[in-house]
Image (cartoon, coloured by chain):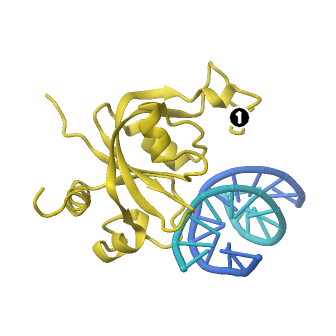
Chain colours: A yellow, B blue, C cyan
Amino acid sequence: MTTEPRYWLTKSEPSDYSIDEMQRDRVEIWDGVRNYQARNFLREMRCGDLAFFYHSNVKPPAIVGLMRVAEENIVDPTQFDKADKHYDPKATPEKPRWQTVRFEFAEKFAQPLTLDRLKEMFAPEELLVVKRGNRLSVMPVSAEAAAKILQEVRGEAG
DNA sequence: GCCAACGTTGGC
DNA sequence: GCCAACGTTGGC
């Protein structure tokens, strides 16, 4: 039995890591997430799930592309790295605290789908990222919302 | 640059 | 285990 791929949205400040870098790298471990709610969503991700790539802290904030989960339930290596910004002294290889996934690049959208446009398309309950004050960097997206986003990005013909 | 929202920390 | 203080995120 197979399950339908689920949809997610992951934020990144393009000054840290952008969709263009993702396109260049093709595959990347989504490391450095240090929020338990976000981590729990990362733990739920399965191979084949799709994640919208959202550029935050830029003008305009927007969904800019799509990634696919290539490897699930990875131990985030940066938690053990003292030199890393995201080093966690409470994490040990025996008892890691932070898991994530490896994403592969899927698509860069021809046109970014801006937060303003997303607010026109969705109520806050329909798409978490349009909710005011939302700081979560990894969140689920319903199949309905994902379909609407993809239709918007690809045009009525697609 | 401001500040609302909210997660985390630590004193008690 | 409460909650004030603090830090961070991220839109505006």
Q: Chain of mark 1?
A: A
- In the rendered view, tell whether residue A61 sits above or below residue A11: below
Most extreme residue toward the top is A94
In-image side of A36 versus A116 (left or right): right
Q: Considering the image in quadrants, where does the C terminus of chain A appear?
A: bottom left
Label 1 sits on what residue type?
Asp
| Quadrant of the rendered image containing residue A72 | top left
- At a point 51% along the width and 42% down the height, the residue shown is A39
Q: Is residue A101 visible?
A: no
What residue did someone put label 1 on? A88
Residue in the image at 35% along x and 69% along y: A118
Relative image position of residue A129 (x, y in whole percent): 42, 63
Residue A102 locus on image (x, y percent): 44, 30
Residue A110 x, y percent position in the rendering: 31, 55
Instruction: Identify which residue, A105 or A38, lies in the foreground.
Output: A105
Residue C9: image quadrant is bottom right
Residue plotted at (30% across, 39% down): A49
Query: What residue is shown at x 55% (from left), y 46% (from top)?
Result: A36
Between A99 and A95, the one lying in front of the other is: A99
Give the quarter of the image for residue A144.
Answer: bottom left
Q: Residues within 10 Å of mark 1 (few under 14, many from 20)?
A: some
SS under mark 1: loop
Q: Is residue A101 above or below residue A58?
A: above
Q: Relative to the observer, which residue lies in front, C4 or A75?
A: A75
Residue A24, above or below A93: below
In the rendered image of this protein, does residue A151 appear above or below residue A123?
above
* Number of dots carrying numbers: 1
Query: Does C2 sit left or right of A47 as displayed?
Result: right
* Residue A54 in view here: yes
Residue A76 image position (x, y, % from top left): 56, 30
Q: Name the quadrant of the N terminus of chain A.
A: top left
